[in-house]
Amino acid sequence: MAGGVLVLAEARRGELREVSLELLALGRELADSAGLELRAALVDSEPERFVGQLAATGLTEVLLVRAPTAHFEAHVWEQALAAMIEQERPSLVLLGQTIDSLGFAAAVAARLGLGFASDVTGARFIDGALYVTRGAYGEKLIAELAFPDRECTLLTVRAGIFAAAPVDGSRPPVREVSLELADASATEHLGFVEVAESDVDITKAEFLLSIGRGVEDAENIPRFERLAERLGATLSVSRPLVDAGWMPAARQVGQSGKTVRPRVYLAMGISGAVQHLAGMRQADLIIAVNSDPEAPIFSVAHYGAVADMFEVADALEALLD
Amino acid sequence: MKILVCVKQVASLDEEFELGGDGLSVDPEFVEWELNEWDSFALEAALRLREQIGASGDEVVVATVGAEVAEDGLLGCLARGADRAVRVWDESLASADVLVVARVLAAVARREQPDLVLCGVQSSDAVNGATGTALAGLLALRRVAVVKRIEPEPEGRALVVERELEGGLLERLRVKLPALLTVQTGIFEPRYATLRAIKQAREKPLERLGPGELGLSPEELSGHAGARLVALRPPERGEGAQLLDGSADRIAARILELVRERVG
């Protein structure tokens, strides 16, 4: 397949992850624009179970690699991807910027001397040369990157940016790639730990009042709990409040917390780190209050107020009296 | 146990800023520098592990690839309890990308021969999430990324760790040493340095090296860059948020109106 586009799909505990189809959509667009073939690959203990779900139009092949471990293992995946790149010689490899990828993608790029960019939000070919965009200086700027003289470039692509490719039941040819992975595992899986369930399920709430670092102190949280109650909202939080031990993880919105889709998301004192936006950008109505006019939350909000969250909270309470 | 903690001084931009003459960086006048938040947690994890294991001969070394502005961050680490610091820099590293930085850190690690390397999961300015894992790849070191909990086994030859997956799920793993972990925020509460320790930090060893002293040539390093920066521009602000302005009272009234339209 020398010169094609290779998408590495991702599954966890027997389920294909949505980002896989987003990667296929981007891969399709890039492959078409440069006249390249598109292949999907999947590493898993039983990779064949996902073939039906990867059946997007126009795939030249689905490559299956049988993993010796029941679950994702970073060193096995590193070895599998490196071997696949050396054997199949793709010119472009797409992975998700996911927690699993964070454990091996950069290792493959460094070891094989590939072109590499992470957390990519846009990619295109211009006259046969690849250009990608990603955030810089904490998303205050967009960087455009090129990969001169690279035979192969590996990109980890931000999840939730590209619409998932439609799966149409086409039957792409399947090829099992056999690789020497038996001794690759270097960690021992001891089990999964679920975050303690709580009586509140923020994913079911129609209206979330969400607070972040702007609250400054644990002592300020009760007043927002009261405000949420009076508004008829459920209180959720961004990561720093959970890290500080002020709020339980069950209340956390974002990549490592819950993905929410309420009818109204009122964000106060949340700047909007990428990982947070990933968990709330699909809310029907997003209203953001933040004192920093440059806060990234305003880029996804429908309504925004550059204001002090405490003053707005006071005013809301006064109106509810 | 010897622990190497890789840290970075990150850039945060003023509200208003301008690009430098090359158009590929921000004018330093508008940049403030601080220790990367994730690295602060990595250092804390190293200090706690040392306290927990408590064997003699234990050492916590911090290393960075960065210009002189990075020394503030290193001094902060020394004040909080690191034993010594290494800063690698020369002008050839000014445009170093994540793979080049990993290559320099790999040279430091080969010299230091640590039992454990700790890195932050990502930096707040570049948000690659790649330095630690690239470093592990170059050193052929066992690694676990995005670690939220670390427990040393009694003999100190392995760690039981939990890595944080999406959606609030954790995976528990056992990894033998030597190893590299990328550390997530919130793993422990980072300590503050006492005033006395801040003064004493200046007495601790801070070594300044050029890449040449680690056996790295500029050509070799630039040849290993993953990408070349060709342009830097402000993000396209799609529709953007519709602005609610006026007093806090007026903003609150509009918010209440919008909310009531949607959720009654």
Image (spheres, coloured by chain):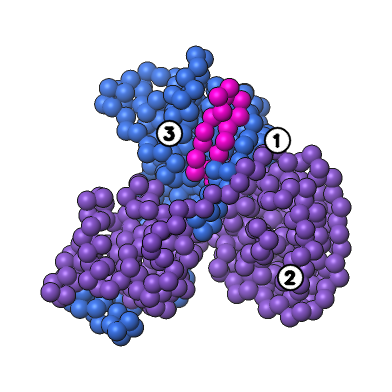
In this view, A87 is above or below A130: above
Q: Residue A54, labelled with which disc?
A: 2
Q: Chain of mark 1?
A: B
- Look at discs 2 and 1 and give the one toward the viewer: 2
A81 horizontally vs A197: left or right: right
Range covered by the magenta-colored residues: B144-161
Q: Nearer the viewer, residue A100 or A72?
A: A72
Q: What residue type is disc 1 on?
A: Ala
- Could you tell me which residue is drawn at 87 percent across and 63 percent down? A175
- Could you tell me which residue is drawn at 38 percent across and 43 percent down? B33
Chain coloured blue: which letter? B
Residue picked out by circle 1: B140
The outermost residue toward the top is B56
Q: What residue type is disc 2 on?
A: Leu
Residues at marks 2 and 1, CA–CA distance in whole angstroms: 32 Å
* Image quadrant where one finds the C terminus of chain B: bottom left
Q: Nearer the viewer, residue A115 or A118?
A: A118
Query: What x and y, as percent, mark residue A238?
Result: 38, 58
In this view, A226 is above or below A264: above
Q: How many discs mark residues in the rendered view?
A: 3
What secondary structure is the stretch in magenta mostly built from?
strand
Chain coloured purple: which letter? A
Q: Does the segment drawn in magenta span residue B110? A: no
Residue picked out by circle 3: B44
